[in-house]
Image (spheres, rainbow, N blue to C red):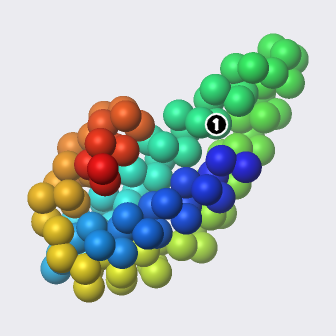
């Protein structure tokens, strides 16, 4: 699913995305991954018949929460070690998936 691809992209980006503050790094990771994941997931969910959307949304939420819980500590550590405070702040400030992706271009 697109979530796995987003997680890989996020890991690569965040490996070079921030330095220092683990709280800011985690906040940036959570915001970026949520915006990008739900942008793709919502498109897939909306393409389903209405009767299937609630179950699809519930399944997507479970996948997102599991993937994030399994990766946030590693990504935060990589982020803290990397070195780009401006990119981290951009990812924190992003309000849309487009905004978030622009931070990593």
Residue 8 appears in which quarter of the rendering? Answer: bottom right
Q: Residue visible at 65% across and 47% down?
A: 2
Looking at the picture, how far across and down is residue 76, in whole percent?
A: 36, 75
Looking at the picture, how far across and down is residue 17, in whole percent?
A: 27, 67
Q: Residue visible at 44% across and 41% down?
A: 35
Q: Residues within 10 Å of mark 1 (few under 14, many from 20)?
A: many
In the drawing, does residue 78 fall left or right of residue 37? Answer: left
Looking at the picture, how far across and down is residue 20, in whole percent?
A: 16, 79
Residue 1 can be seen, yes or no: yes
Q: Residue furthest front?
A: 105
Residue 65 can be seen, yes or no: no
Give the number of marks: 1
The residue carrying mark 1 is 41
Tell me the element at label 1.
helix
Residue 81's place in the image compared with 22, above or below, is below
Q: Residue visible at 46% across and 69% down?
A: 11
Q: Residue visible at 55% across and 45% down?
A: 37
Residue 77 appears in which quarter of the rendering? Answer: bottom left
């Amino acid at each position: 699913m697109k979530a796995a691809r987003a997680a890989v992209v996020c890991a690569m980006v965040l490996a070079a995305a921030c330095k220092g503050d683990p709280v800011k790094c985690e906040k940036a990771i959570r915001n970026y991954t949520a915006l990008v994941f739900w942008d793709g997931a919502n498109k897939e969910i909306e393409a389903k018949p209405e009767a299937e959307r609630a179950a699809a949304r519930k399944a997507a939420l479970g996948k997102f929460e599991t993937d994030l819980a399994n990766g946030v500590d590693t990504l935060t550590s990589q982020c803290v070690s990397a070195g780009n405070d401006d990119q981290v702040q951009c990812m924190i400030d992003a309000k849309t998936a487009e905004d978030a992706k622009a931070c990593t271009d």
